[in-house]
Image (cartoon, rainbow, N blue to C red):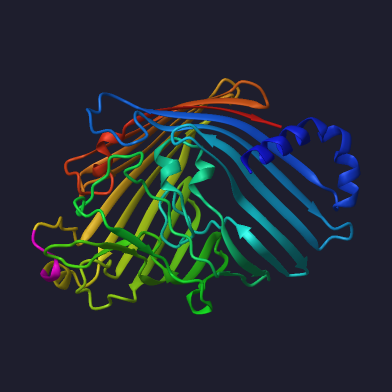
Amino acid sequence: MERAWILVVLFLAPCRSAWAGDLASGLGGLEWHGSVQVNYASRLGATGQGKPPSGDFLLGEERLQLQLSGAAPKGGAGYFVKADFFRDEADGRSDMDMREAYLSYAEGPWDLRAGRQIHTWGVGDLLFINDLFPKNYVALFSGRPMEYLKTGASSLKTSFYSDQASLDLVAIPFFEPDQLPTSQRFFIFDPFQQVANRTESRPRHDLGNTELAARLYRSILGFDAALYAYRGFFRTPSMEPDSMTAPSKLTMVYPRLSVYGASLQGNAAGGVLSLEAGCYDSRQDRAGSNPMIPNSQTRFLAGYQRSPWTDFTAGLQYYGEYMHRYDRYEASLPAGFPKQDRLRQLLTLRLTQLLKYQTWKLSLFSFWSPTDEDFYFIPEAAWRMTDELTATMGANIFGGARSTTFLGQLNRNDNLYLAMRYEF
């Protein structure tokens, strides 16, 4: 299969100009684009003897992306496909990643999309409250381009538009979890590291487990306002041991979740103000007495972005997670387990400077939690060498006072990444 894909790609690439015109007329104005990308990430500093199986390299990829799109001659119907073919030297694997592949139909104030799609909701910058769709944090932490943080989901989306308000409805019948760092490439904290017998229990592909999401949005006094609702599952798994005192087996489960939220974004005080909040209803632990399942929470953020001078942008965000029924959580927490704060707080800063006719982009994105006492910095420099070729160098730098917090556990995974991308 791997060799077959390589042969197809090598055959199609040089034939673009020869058959694109004829094919376009047969497939409703076919347009196709693509890119070739190389992406490598290596750890910074000495890591000792107990390295993950991938060694010093978190990433070693060569990747080809192809995009196809088109519409029916009379309009209304269309299609879009985005597929990546890649070789990952870090684990010696070649594969294809179907990032998006959907059919669409539009008529008047209504449209429909069916297939694998990437959905983006909410107003946070790398902070997600009402965006409950799958994400790839391995890609973020190992220096892949930011587009790879979002992953597609096989789904049905329908939208209705009017002058009063617009509505998006999404149904996802096949659950996909977030892709999180594992011990294959990362140093991570594991409270049950002595337990080797592990299984994963994802929601079955039953109609009753279909995830449902809705967004109602409109403009109010110059601000973009939205209401959200979601019914599905946590995408980050919870560990369920067969015994709290002497576990011999762990099961990774995805508890049921409902979320209700709102957002507001618009111009204010010479910049852009963003507000978002969501109430997380942990439906399998509403009492808050099961320490292995997340308690219900209220999550919120406030952000402000401004450009004080030409080609420079600065953005700040404050984010919080307030745990409900905290007294029951404390009472049920097993001895020796790390305890979460009632209110987890996080601050982010984004700085971006464009130079030399915007062919250079210097940026810094940073996370810092005063409650978890951990941080994450992403400095990056990108050089657009030509209209088609871009080179990028950056780093992922982690740290924290404790190895039990989300960012603190990644303390030994600092890495430098290099990437080149040619678009055609």
Residue 30's place in the image compared with 350, above or below, is: below
Q: Residue at x 53, y 66 (%)?
A: 174
- Viewer-closest of 254 and 167: 254
Residue 98's place in the image compared with 421, above or below, is: below
> Which range is magenta?
331-335
Q: Residue at x 54, y 60 (%)?
A: 224
Instruction: Residue 311: give x, y in percent of width and height.
Output: 53, 30
- Viewer-closest of 302 and 94: 94
Instruction: Residue 271: give x, y in percent of width and height.
Output: 48, 45
Q: Residue at x 47, y 55 (%)?
A: 123
Q: Check if residue 242 falls in the magenta segment.
A: no
Where the N terminus falls, by quadrant? top right
Residue 234's place in the image compared with 281, above or below, is: above
Question: Residue 416: which quarter of the image?
Answer: top left
Question: Residue 402: which quarter of the image?
Answer: top left
Q: Main secondary structure of the magenta part?
A: loop
Instruction: Residue 313: give x, y in percent of width and height.
Output: 47, 36
Instruction: Residue 159: give x, y in percent of width and height.
Output: 65, 68
Question: Residue 7: which quarter of the image?
Answer: top right
Where the C terminus falls, by quadrant? top right
- Viewer-closest of 374 and 99: 99
